[in-house]
Image (spheres, grey):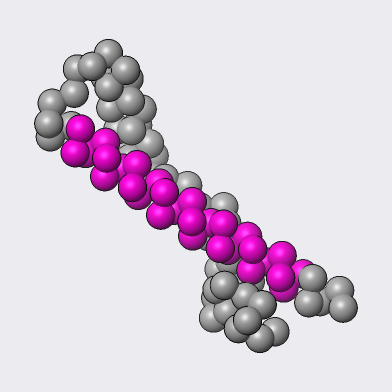
Amino acid sequence: MTNETSILPNVSTPGLRALANAKLAPKDQAKLSSLLARNSERLLSEVETSELDSLIEQIDELNLLKARAEYTLRQQKNAGEQ
């Protein structure tokens, strides 16, 4: 497979599967849920708002990485079928 057909060409297939199934750490997920609940009630301090923004940014990055891993796995599968 060439680098042109793969976004994460140097990651092993097991590594790609792990990335595709990655989740936010349970501690971070609990904190996110708490902050979102408090945010919906408009009870967040500036520090908590910053923390919520940081967690959301982390989730965005994780989702991009997961999408890249899933895309690369599909490309590997398609290359194997040819």
| Location of residue 82 (image quadrant) | bottom right
Q: Position of residue 47 (x, y in %)?
A: 12, 34
Q: Position of residue 51 (x, y in %)?
A: 21, 39
Chief SS of the magenta region: helix
Q: Which residues are magenta?
A: 49-77
Q: Is residue 9 magenta?
A: no
Left or right placement of residue 76 versus residue 31 in this view: right
The outermost residue toward the bottom is: 2
User: From the image, which quarter does the N terminus lie in?
Assistant: bottom right
**Is residue 12 at least partly visible in the picture?**
no
- Residue at image position (56%, 63%) is 68
* Count of labels in the image: 0
Identified at 26% across, 45% down, the residue is 54
The picture places residue 11, in percent across and down from the top left corner, at 55, 75
Left or right: 46, with 4 as reference point: left
Q: Residue furthest front?
A: 4
The answer to whether any part of residue 20 appears in the image is: yes
Residue at 27%, 13% (x, y): give it: 41
Q: Is residue 50 above or below residue 74?
A: above
